[in-house]
Amino acid sequence: MASKPRLQEKPKPAKRDEPLVRERYAYVAGLTLNPDPGVDYSRVLSGPGQRAATSVSGIAAAVLSYFFVYPLVMQLILLIGYVVRGRPTGVFLQYTKAAVAFEYPEGLLASHMGLASLIIVTMLLMKYAHQRDGKWLSSVQPGLRWRYLILCLGISLIVMNAMYWVSAGRFEFVWNPQSDAVVWIALIVVTTPLQAAGEEYFFRGYLTQVVGSLIKWKWVSILASSLLFALAHGIDLQNIPLFVTRFAFGLLMGVLIVYTGGLEAAIAAHVANNVSTFTYAALNGDVAGARAITEATWEAAAWNIGAYAVTGVLCWLLGNKLRVAKYTPAL
């Protein structure tokens, strides 16, 4: 009978007494370096080849990419949509405003693919700024642990939808499918996982690790990425309960990635939340309304945060059951 796999033991951190010739050579030659063994997810960008100046430059490059690459990808897709639709408003700026407000399905496509482009941005930063393989962003295994992600997605869909129907769903939902609902739902199902992954790789992934390379206390990394995630939704575009909801989501998911060693559970929860929200909106006839939400009540915030917390605990327990790696291995 096969014995059960042993729980992963935390490898001992590598000694840093040897000269840094190998690190300097790797930087010049464009090679990749592995992180020190025995560190958690937040410290993957500490160790070989890393300098404070590199991390600060990485944060600056990430912020600039968020404000330039993401909108640029959106605009390119919207330009194609504008031409294909035969210039419906006559003025591209008017069309863009309507599409970004999700009055056209391609607006959702453009927004989601713009955020998905952040995956590429973070992978490039890992390789060319930090000499790390992008797989270290997915988990400390390294790489994406697909079985764990899919199981967490199932948990997230069940918990979040159950909490929705128990709280507000039975009162708020009215069957009134949006025009072209099939198109909307198809785009939601196909592109939302990419959008959610883009935000997770950017906020819970790269920003958590790059802040962790500067400050060794994991809670600082978690708090910083959570605050930036909430602020990225617009300071003047959300009231306090909605801001608290988004901050709490970032905080709970940040804790989850550090204590499960990867992004899988956070991606699953993000996908489940957004797919459910926009699918209900498409069936309720108000995708634009779901996009334009700027306010939440404290009661709604409490239910949502409760759903995120239950999801997080169950995914953490599942991670323990599957014995997912929580520290970098000795390679």
Image (cartoon, rainbow, N blue to C red):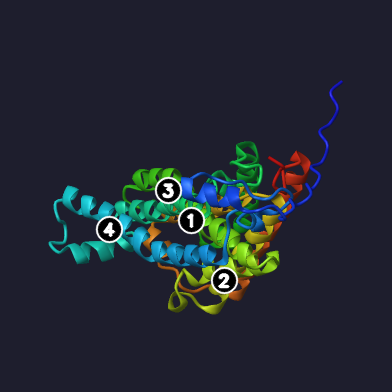
Q: CA distance from mark 2 to mark 1?
A: 24 Å
Q: Residue at x 46, y 77 (%)?
A: 235
- Image marks 2 and 1: residues in contact by CB distance under 8 Å: no
Say whether disc 4 or disc 3 marks the residue closer to the N-terminus: 4
Tell me, yes or no, if residue 34 can be seen here. Answer: yes
Name the amino acid type tagged 4: Gln
Helix, strand or loop at disc 1?
helix
Q: Which mark is residue 227?
A: 2
Disc 3 versus disc 2: distance between alpha carbons? 26 Å
Q: Nearer the viewer, mark 2 or mark 1?
A: 1
Residue 129's disc is 1
Q: Secondary structure at mark 3?
A: helix
Q: To which residue does mark 4 refer?
A: 75
Q: Residues within 10 Å of mark 2 (few under 14, many from 20)?
A: some
From the viewer's side, name the closer residue of 97 and 276.
Answer: 97
**Residue 19 placement, left or right of 63:** right
Task: Please tell me how crowded label 3 is: few (under 14), some (14-19), or many (20+) other residues with Cα within 10 Å.
Answer: many
Residue 249 lies, with reference to residue 121, above or below; the image says below
Asked whether disc 1 touches disc 4, contact meaning CB atoms under 8 Å apart, the reply is: no
Q: Is residue 86 above or below residue 89?
A: above
Relative height, residue 90 to residue 324 (above, below):
below
Tag of residue 326:
none
- In percent of width and height, residue 157 lies at 60, 48
The amino acid on which the numbered mark 1 sits, given as a three-letter code, is Ala
| Residue wearing tag 3 | 188
The kind of secondary structure element at disc 2 is: helix
Q: CA distance from mark 4 to mark 3?
A: 19 Å
Tag in front: 1 or 4: 1
Mark 2 vs mark 4, CA separation in Å: 27 Å
